[in-house]
Amino acid sequence: MKLTVDMLTDLSVGAAFLATGGGGDPHITYLCAQQGLRRYGPADLIQPEELPDDAMVVAIGAVGAPTTSLELLPSIDESARVLEEYRRRTGRAVDAVVSFEIGGGNSLIPIVAAAANGIPVIDGDGMGRALPEATMMTFAIAGMSPTPALALDYAGNTEMIDAPDVHAYERLIRAFAMQRGGMAISAEFQMSGAQMKSCVVPGTVSLSIALGKILRSGGGNADQLAPALADLFENSIYGAFRQLYSGTVSDMSTNVIGGYDVGRAVIESLTNGTPSLHIDIKNEYLTACLDSKILASVPDLITILDYETAQPINAERLRYGQRVSVFAIGCPAHYRTTQALSVVSPRCFGFDFDYVPLDAET
Amino acid sequence: MRIGIDVGGTHTDAVVLDGETVIAAHKALTSEDVVTGVVDALTYLASQTIDFGAIEAVMIGTTQFTNAVVQRRDMAPVAAIRLGLPSGRGMLPMLGWPEDMAAAMGGHIYMLHGGYLYDGQLLAPMDEAEIEAVVTDLVTKGIRTAAITSAFSPMNAQPEQHVANRIRARIPDMRITMSHRIGRVGLLERENAALLNASLLAFADKVVSAFDNALAQFGLHCPIFISQNDGTLMDAAFVREFPALTFSSGPTNSLRGAARLTGLEDAIVVDIGGTTSDIGLLRGGFPRESNMVVEVGGVRTNFRMPDVMAIGLGGGSLVSDDGCSIGPQSVGHKLVTEGLIFGGSTLTVTDIVVAAGQADIGDRQMVAHLPPELVANGLATIRRMLENGIRKMKPNADPLPVILVGGGAILAPDTLAHASAIHRPENSSVANAIGAAIALIGGEAERFVNYNERSRDVCIADTRMAAHDAAIAAGAATETIRVTEIEETPIPYMDQGAMRIRIKVVGDVEALVSGKEPAL
């Protein structure tokens, strides 16, 4: 399939939904990808199984604090350059690129790199959502090495990163980004086609486009779109889908959980007497609780939509008084293993309870 | 005493306030040239034995600058100068603008090296030769207006100031908007705001001079203030520099006027006009702001705008044959000829409430034939629309007082679900003009900080001082300045303690406090 400029709006809205409140403002990355594809032409989107087992694929995306790119704008050639530099510095072949995070702007960055370099982009990613650290990628959980990686800053400076493990890599790449204005683009996790197929979350790029199409259809408010969303997710690798709650954001505060400042949003029902819903936030929406009952928890996806327009609202933009609807979606099976849950369960974010799978709730 | 004037799309309202008391009010049609409508209003007030010598200030709310942008007229070509390279390569100014709007700007784009990073480090040093080439090009092309934007200028504006100085050294009469003076963090939206503002600078001179002249005709030599979109005021000199800050001041004045007329600080305000009802929320006497990106004439900006929801219910809204559906089509100001009660042939919402005996205007006999069921359905539809709108704007499940203002307030019933009480204040038809007259002077500042590097108290004190200075620059009396909002937002994916602080302050008008001209 050809990924063209006119598909980017659907993709970025779908990716904002899968960002579960994180990923920053998608508008700037969208504009950048739009200009990129106008310059380089469309990209080829291929299914993971279409890539030969012996072909080489590399993951590309941005690392850092999306808020800083509100001022430090991305450049339309930077994802192409990170790939060129990666090839030049490592001497390795790259036959395809893949997104390491479908949630938010990182869904778009590999597409521009693919278009500029005339290679395909994989329909899939390394998270199926958004998460804060490289250690949480399905690639890392499957034991793939993130290095050698190449990081590129806004000025075009590059640095090769070698690290003994993904934890060390995560510290090095983040330090690089913070020292260079808060954002960097990286090429990392080089894998063979066979390795990629063993751990990629498949089909998430095309699913994002389909998701964005539903959200942008003008088909009504969050309640009215819920059946179409349920149909999409229930027939995908995600499986479970719930509309948890609708109401008005009545409080935003900060809690200290496990040594971290974690934001908490309280959503109050418009029906008197119904208990309010609490959402705990650390970059992403992590847990949704009604009284003491856990309705949904990370790594399942929790997303908040503006009730009227059914557009995703990220955590930075969630404000007192907004009318919203809260949705939960089961995570892909990749995150249900003991090994995966050892890095992405609620305990890894400081909560003192275990993951409660969404489908176990019914 | 002070005079408040609100120039709306249809009506020009004027009031005279003595302290808290309305001593005269007038509603007239807005004239094509705006100034004639203002002169008409002042002529009426002058005829009401008002001593114009005792007027200390005139406050004006105007939609002229919004209309100029929406209609793409009275806009001058602008050089878009950005300092941010080597970041943002290929992300040119005016990306995503409607084509006709970008065309109105003339397509003069200059991308230069410079700006800062989030942590206060230089993004890139400025290149003097690059700047010189831009200035030469401006001279050659005869461009006389510029908008200058540099990365992180709300935190460090030195690059914008430097380029402005370099331009003025060669072109002393250049009209310049520096983005840090008009917008907040968010380079593209701030740059858009600066571009729209710059393109209106020449028009602003014309408008302010016209107001000056109109007032002088009546012997009014007091200071003039213009309403801003956040419910605060700027003095005339400030408007000549920042006309774009008047965008959306109409709904804000209506909300603030409603607060003053009732003394309520927390309430829902429903402003019912001819075509729509605008529903907003008052919190602490000020409108709740929209936190969405605001589009003006199709351009994304980050102006401070009130969160107002418009529903298609007004005095002229069309009613379906069964009464179960109303609007959004409306006969608008033609109600007085097309409505049934005025001898016309269109069934409007006003006809329904007159038929029901809820209001007494026009000729009631003309609606005597309407079936009772239609009238009952119509009233139920009005109620449902208002109740739905109020429910959506409420901040929580608790009932709130509802203030009805505007010419169409008679459409609303005396009780509504979600309303703890219904207020129909006297003089509500001129709430906008009252809102303009009572407005305060505001100031705002925003900083990216790290509480691990400097204490929270120091960071907040610094930001508050910057907001304080901004308010004084806009004409506020120092001793009256108070903080109205402190917003702390953690910056995601950064170190613990990384925060964005935004502080707003307001103060009384210096000229009214001390009787002297505000210092600029």
Image (cartoon, coloured by chain):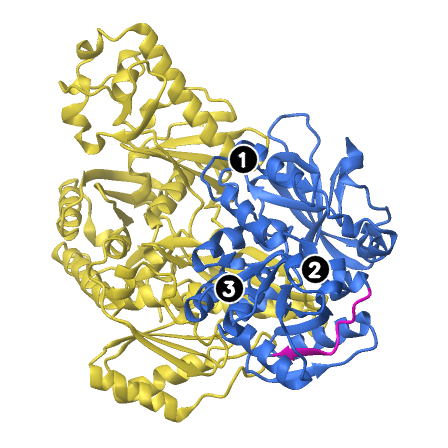
Chain colours: A blue, B yellow
Where is residue A57 shown, x and y percent of the image? 67, 69
Callouts 2 and 3 in the same chain: yes
Up-down: is A86 above or below A99? Answer: below
Task: Answer whether residue A148 is magenta in the image.
Answer: yes
Residue range corresponding to the magenta coloring: A143-152
Residue A58 appears in which quarter of the rendering? bottom right
Amino acid at the residue labelled 1: Leu
The answer to whether marks 2 and 1 mark residues whose Cβ atoms lie closer than 8 Å is no
Res. A43 mark: 3
Under tag 1, what secondary structure?
helix
Up-down: is A195 above or below B169? Answer: above
User: Where, quadrant-wise, is the C terminus of chain B in this rendering?
Assistant: bottom left
Amino acid at the residue labelled 2: Gly
Residue occupying image coordinates x 13% and y 45%: B40
Q: Pointer 1: residues within 10 angstroms few (<14), some, or many (20+)?
A: some
Residue B342 appears in which quarter of the rendering? top left
Between B205 and B134, the one nearer to me in the picture: B134
Res. A126 mark: 2
Where is residue B363 shown, x and y percent of the image? 17, 14
- Left or right: A81 as drawn, with respect to B478: right
Under tag 2, what secondary structure?
loop
Q: Is residue B241 visible?
A: no
Q: Pointer 2: residues within 10 angstroms few (<14), some, or many (20+)?
A: many
Res. A225 mark: 1
